[in-house]
Amino acid sequence: MKLQVNRAYNFNAGPSALPLSVLEKAQEELLDFRRTGMSVMELSHRSKAYEEVHNHAIDSLRELLSIPDDYKVLFLQGGASLQFSMIPMNFLQAEKKAAYVMTGSWSEKAFSEAKLLGEVYYAASTKDGNYRSIPKLKELQYHTDDAYLHITSNNTIYGTQWKEFPNTGGVPLIADMSSDILSKPIDVNNFALIYAGAQKNLGPSGVTVVIIRKDFLEQANTQIPTMLKYSTHAKNNSLYNTPPTFGIYMLSEVLNWAKELGGLDVIADLNEKKAKLIYDVIDTSNGFYLGHAEQDYRSLMNITFNLKTPELEKSFLEKAKQEGFIGVNGHRSIGGCRVSAYNAVPIKGCQAFREFMIQFQKENY
């Protein structure tokens, strides 16, 4: 029997909202997973029952993102933050440099980790403009013999997003897609490696997805610890050691939900509509609400804004919490307000928040 619960309007930046139907199915299967007499959390990762979950998750991700056969799909741990180190450990050779495009806090962190392991430099940066935009493609400056070019596709803290990706020719393109993977169709062929923490659009925290081209994988450094080699996980179907089995089960069910919804074209359309509901209020508020990102680079996942005075902003955030809107405070490093409208956030949640914004302006203008 399903419990009746009051669901919050969850705008947390991560871990973030999960589809209600997925949570309900997990609840239903929690004690006896497919007549095994065990929870999926109790299954051996070597069992047939778990192997089916694991492979279904890989196949579903391949289907949704149209991942070609010459790419491996890996399920790792350590979040995107470990990828900041693993990537240069595997691919930043001593005689080469790596280029990083600086568009926010997470690209800064990725750069800082890589700097500990090899020679890196900025291909472009929008820091001087307080990360309100994404560099134009023609502004990117990197070398044809670079080990790789690294970008962060969506910036959760500042609310900017790449609308098109660079064509790097022979330079391997690597993207941290933690906060917008699965939010729209992409051409995986443009990338040598994509990585993403699961806790925004793919499932709960604890799983990191890596999509890596096989010929790029073959170039990796072999003189590093076993668990930090991509090849270790690629050769063992991400089962070299015990994977985060429950997280992968949940990821598999989120992918099922995405397919039932109609796939990435439908999801992308919904995300456009959700973001527009809130951006329209900002744009028509006569300066009462002040969007952080420049319009051409606005994120559909993370809508960031301020109010015209700090006092109003404080009152707005307090009132939002009272009304049941969770996670609207901006990141602790910059403050302000942020609405994270990831895939599983229902459109009715964005509609409700839109009405709240309009009403708050009426009462405080």
Image (spheres, grey):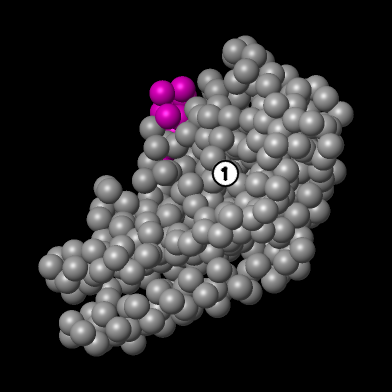
The magenta segment: 113-123
Q: Can the viewer see residue 144? A: no
- Residue at 54%, 40% (x, y): give it: 205
Q: Is residue 327 magenta?
A: no
Q: Give the left or right position of residue 204, taking residue 350 as reference.
A: right
Is 83 located above or below residue 355 in the figure? above
Q: How many marks?
A: 1
Q: Residue lying at the far front in this picture: please name it.
A: 1
Nearer to the camera, 119 or 63 = 63
> Mark 1 sits on what residue?
204
- What kind of residue is marked 1? Pro
Q: Position of residue 75 (x, y in %)?
A: 67, 34
Look at the numbered disc 1 and give the secondary structure of its residue. loop
Q: Position of residue 224 (x, y in %)?
A: 59, 14
When asked about the image quadrant of residue 298, the answer is bottom left
Crowding around mark 1 (Cα neighbors within 10 Å: few <14, some 14 to 19, many 20+) is many
Nearest to the observer: residue 169 or residue 295:
295
Q: Quadrant of residue 159?
A: bottom left
List x then y, in percent, for residue 320.
Answer: 30, 67
Quadrant (top left/top right/bottom left/bottom right) for the C terminus: bottom left
Q: Residue visible at 48% across and 47% down?
A: 15
User: Relative to the observer, which residue lies in front, 283 or 92?
Assistant: 283
Whether residue 289 appears in this view of the structure is yes
- Placement of 196 over or under 261, stated as above or below: above
Q: Residue at x 83, y 25 (%)?
A: 47
Query: Is 72 displayed left or right of 139 in the figure?
Result: right
Say which of 99 and 132 sits in front: 132
